[in-house]
Image (cartoon, helix red, strand yellow):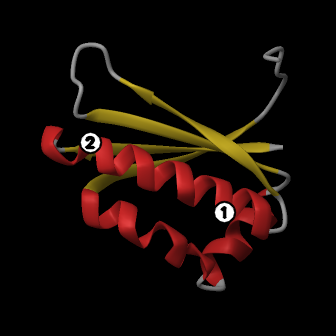
Amino acid sequence: MIRILYNWNVAPEKLELFIETWKKTTNKIHKEVKGARGSFMVQSDNDPTAIKTMARWDSLDDWKKFWHEGNHSQMGFMHDLGERVSVEIFREIDDFTS
């Protein structure tokens, strides 16, 4: 398993729509894209415009295929609402969340 961490900056006036768009987008990707295992979103307590989303994937190859085959168009509306600052890839070692 891998995790992909996306760092976003979202203007306060666009935040509510960004969150709703993310919910629809992440659920659609989870249902339709091979290897996608869902994701979660967190917001900085110190800076409400700083949003992080972390997606879980079966493999790095599945995530790369998602990006290289153009399936990332599902995220287009999110890019219209927020600025994606960075993307980081992490290998999952263990997970004790329920």
How many badges with numbers are in the image? 2
Q: In which quadrant is the N terminus drawn?
A: top right
Q: Few, some or many C-alpha atoms within 10 Å of disc 2 (few <14, some 14-19, many ≥20)?
A: some
Please, what secondary structure does the residue beneath circle 1 have? helix
According to the picture, the residue beneath numbered tag 1 turns out to be: 28
Residue at 50 percent across and 40 percent down: it is 53
In three-dimensional space, the C-alpha distance between marks 1 and 2, rounded to whole angstroms, equals 20 Å
Residue at 24 percent across and 26 percent down: it is 48
In primary-sequence order, the first of circles 1 and 2 is 2
Instruction: Give the image location of residue 44, x and y in percent.
Output: 33, 21
Q: Is residue 64 above or below residue 86?
A: below
Please, what secondary structure does the residue beneath circle 2 have? helix
Q: Is residue 45 above or below residue 87?
A: above
| Direction from residue 56 to residue 67 in the image, left or right | left
Kindly tell me whether residue 56 is visible in this rendering: no
Amino acid tagged 2: Leu
| Direction from residue 12 to residue 17 in the image, left or right | right
According to the picture, the residue beneath numbered tag 2 turns out to be: 15
Residue at 36 percent across and 35 percent down: it is 51
